[in-house]
Amino acid sequence: MAFRYASKMAAAMQKSKSVSELLSKGGNRLAALKATSQARSRVLDQVRAALPAKLAAAVASAGIEEGRLTLGVVGAVWASRLRYCSDVLRKRVGKSTGLTILGVRIRVVPPPVTLG
């Protein structure tokens, strides 16, 4: 029994692929995940471009779903400041994306982890 398990594990390990290979070939799920990630990255860039530099640096994530712009901000103070300019931000990001943004939701999130 232990031998069969070890044989199956060895076979599975030989079939393993690198992450870059999985992402480049990908399946439907990975392709959808990659597309969503790229779209959110573009929205984040547009949000940061529409804000003053200090406030833009506090925005960790951004995305648009069902007409709502959702922002992740790295502190409650920054979230409060961002709420004051949310209407202008909604209009600017809506114009730059070509989408109608009906509302803005602001969430406090942990700061992003930097590698290296």
Image (cartoon, rainbow, N blue to C red):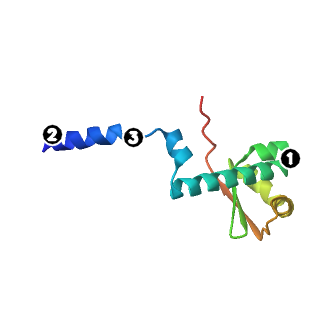
- From mark 1 to mark 3, how far is it between C-alphas? 46 Å
Give the amino acid type for the residue marked by disc 2 in the picture: Phe
Q: Is residue 72 visible?
A: no
Horizontal and vertical percent position of residue 29: 52, 57
Residues 23 and 93: in front is 23
Q: Is residue 75 visible?
A: yes
Which disc is residue 16 wearing?
Answer: 3
Which disc is residue 83 wearing?
Answer: none
Q: Earlier in the sequence, mark 2 or mark 3?
A: 2
Residues 112 and 30: in front is 30
Q: Quadrant of residue 43?
A: bottom right
Give the amino acid type for the residue marked by disc 3 in the picture: Ser
Give the amino acid type for the residue marked by disc 1 in the picture: Pro
Residue that lies at the very extreme toward the left in this rendered image: 1
Q: Quadrant of residue 33?
A: bottom right
Horizontal and vertical percent position of residue 36: 63, 56
- Read off the residue under disc 2: 3
- Read off the residue under disc 1: 52
Please give left or right for residue 80 compared with residue 50 in the image: left
